[in-house]
Image (spheres, grey):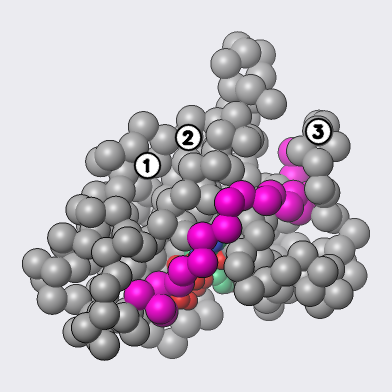
Amino acid sequence: MSTTNQTAPKLIAILGGTFDPIHLGHILPAQETAKWLGTQQLHLIPAHIPPHKNSTHANAKQRAKMVSLVCDNSNIFTLDNRELDRQSPSYTVDTLHEIKAEQPSADLFFIMGMDSLLSFTTWHCWQEILSLCNLVVNIRPGYPLLTLEAALAPELKSRLIYDLAKLQHQKTGQIILHESNPVDISSTEIRAKIKANLHYCQYLPKPVYDYIEQHGLYK
Ligand SMILES: Nc1ncnc2c1ncn2[C@@H]1O[C@H](COP(=O)(O)OP(=O)(O)OP(=O)(O)O)[C@@H](O)[C@H]1O
Ligand SMILES: O=C(O)c1ccc[n+]([C@@H]2O[C@H](COP(=O)([O-])O)[C@@H](O)[C@H]2O)c1
């Protein structure tokens, strides 16, 4: 797939997250995914009120600032602040409706890690999400493919695609598995390392590390 062809539809990749903090496990697989999809446009959307998390550690402004530092050094990533402006839970279905209304002809690809797919049928209006986009699921360390297939709800299993070429003209409703290079880190582990005064700079871009240090986050 390529967006360089004038007739090809515009393709927008989207990675939503709590980003508490954003780390290389978000950034590197997302970069690989954008390249694989053939798009130069990837929206990073920090969730203001993550629907499935009880609370966040850094506030929304700080989490968005860390995402903006990543975008400053990238020609693919764009900080999309739209969820920060909503005072309700950051439902993905609302976000996708908004993007689709702004860019009706664009094909939307919502990126997630395998852990997110396993809980996807608990997401608000998950069927409607699938009517608005395709999902791209990055294999995540600790979530082997066989486990995913065994644990996945049948309504999702039937939508799995292992080969992007098989997508053809299906603009929505498919779940494409992508084997990006695994990056074995989570925000939870980074926060735990900071609390324990352990080294953590290798898991983050330098500007994000500097921001955390300057503001004394996650101590
Ligand atoms: N190491 C990783 N590899 C692939 N995908 C990831 C990785 N870390 C996070 N993701 C995906 O990025 C999205 C946003 O994740 P999130 O911001 O919750 O990060 P997290 O590291 O999982 O956070 P936490 O540990 O606080 O739950 C989710 O879809 C998640 O599956
Ligand atoms: O819409 C939902 O019901 C929903 C439920 C869980 C997660 N999400 C979205 O999935 C993304 C990753 O969420 P999280 O909690 O793993 O950071 C983020 O954009 C959330 O808004 C969305």
Residue type at mark 2? Gln
Q: Mark 2 CB in 8 Å range of ligand 2? A: no
**Residue 198 found in image quarter:** bottom left
- Residue 121 horizontal/vertical position (percent): 73, 73
Residue type at mark 3? Ala
Q: CA distance from mark 1 to mark 2?
A: 7 Å
Q: Nearer the viewer, residue 204 or 81?
A: 204
Above or below: residue 197 compared with residue 23: below
Task: Give the residue number, with chain letter if any, for mark 1.
Answer: 78
Q: Residue at x 63, y 35 (%)?
A: 37
Q: Residue at x 82, y 69 (%)?
A: 146
CB atoms of marks 1 and 2 within 8 Å:
yes
Q: Residue at x 16, y 60 (%)?
A: 210
Mark 2 or 3: in front is: 3
Q: Is residue 189 left or right of residue 96?
A: left
- Residue 142 horizontal/vertical position (percent): 63, 74
Task: Give the residue number, with chain letter if any, for mark 3.
Answer: 165
Location of the N terminus (image quadrant): top right
Q: Is residue 125 left or right of residue 173?
A: left
Q: Which residues are magenta?
A: 171-190
